[in-house]
Image (cartoon, coloured by chain):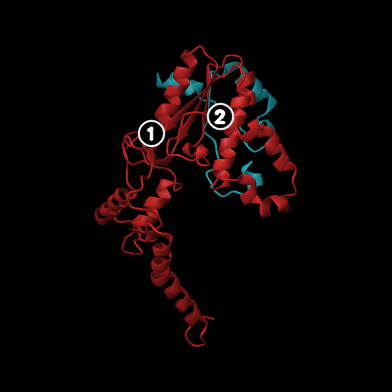
Amino acid sequence: MRANILKKVQPVAGDLIIDNLGISPADRLMLRQEVNVIINSAASVNFDDPLLDAI
Amino acid sequence: MQQLALECENLASHVHVSTAYVNCNRDGGLIEEKIFDLEGNEDPEDIIAKIQSMNPQYIADNEKTLIGRYPNTYTYTKSMAERTFKKRCGNLKAAIVRPSSITACLNEPVPGWTDTLAATGGMCLSVGMGIIHYVKCSGDTIFDIIPADLVSNLVITSAYFRAIDPAPGVHVLNSATSEHSPCKISAFRDGVINYVQYYPYFKQPFKPWTLTTPTDLEYKVRFGLTEQIPLSLMKMASRVPGIGNK
């Protein structure tokens, strides 16, 4: 069971503030084919970021 | 992220985590689980594009006007993100989860587990260490905190329920304690202070005590007398030759 779960874990390099999330085209293709559920829980938790940065 | 979700060939559902405070520009106590259109049905993306085209210095100088009734850029941009998310949703089966102030875990992985000093963690620490003495609010105010594991559970279950539900679109789910299980700010304070009596921090700089001051005036008077004036006297003393450090 545990080994099966670990097989599903695949790190992908990226950066949310770059266009296309900073994900390489190869990784993006893999994600497009393999992913069933996306949970986006990424955020800046600073309440007072300058407006332009916050956008 | 949503663009990627739209491209995914086998996507069952998409969950976006937002904040319970996206509608704090609105009057009334009830936070409905829906996304409100902008005034005059304006397109959120147009507004964002307009702001981005402005001179950065102008934006910095006029931030308060630009975000309108929102108290900070955090809630403003999170609400714009929700509106954009809804607009571009297409055929996605999506959910938006809106937690209030996230706090340490209730049960999993262990009770009290936390990995951040943001939000409630910082509040616990600064009250417990005796750094915050006055909080400008009534002690009866509900401090809406939600344990992190309950939020995670909702995120996971909403991904599942959106996946088995055939209808596309965005479902909004609040994740908050509100009046169902209210925690008054005075109860929060008493809990923290009681706890550190038995389990003090390694560095306990001050004896913890915190007072809630319901009015602006009371807050200013108390804070001024006990913190601001002594501090400025110390500052003045430090400038006197022979007393202060050079």
- Residue drawn at the location 55% of the way across and 38% of the way down: A43
Q: Look at the image and tell me in which quarter the N terminus of chain B lies.
A: top right
| Label 2 CA crowd tier, 10 Å (few <14, some 14–19, many 20+) | few
Q: Look at the image and tell me in which quarter the C terminus of chain B lies.
A: bottom right
- Can residue B13 be seen? yes
- Mark number, residue B149: 1
Picture coordinates of residue B94 (x, y %)?
A: 53, 22
Query: Residue A15 versus residue B135: which sits nearer the camera?
Result: B135
**Label 1 secondary element:** helix
Drawn side of residue A19 relative to residue B163, left or right: right
Q: Which chain is red?
A: B
Picture coordinates of residue A38 (x, y %)?
A: 54, 24
Q: Where B77 falls versus B170 (above or below)?
A: below
Q: Where B92 falls versus B54 (above or below)?
A: above
Subunit of label 2:
A
Question: What is the drawing colour of chain A?
Answer: cyan
Picture coordinates of residue B114 (x, y %)?
A: 39, 42
Query: Residue B221 versus residue B40: which sits nearer the camera?
Result: B40
Q: Amino acid at mark 1?
A: Asp
Subunit of label 1:
B
| Label 1 CA crowd tier, 10 Å (few <14, some 14–19, many 20+) | many
Q: Amino acid at mark 2?
A: Pro
Q: Are marks 2 and 1 on the same chain?
A: no
- Residue drawn at the location 51% of the way across and 85% of the way down: B240
Residue B218 occupies quadrant: bottom left
**Label 2 secondary element:** loop
Picture coordinates of residue B200 (x, y %)?
A: 29, 56
- Can residue A44 be seen? no
Instruction: Quickly name the residue at label 2.
Output: A11
Drawn side of residue B130 relative to residue B44, left or right: left
Q: Nearer the viewer, mark 2 or mark 1?
A: 1
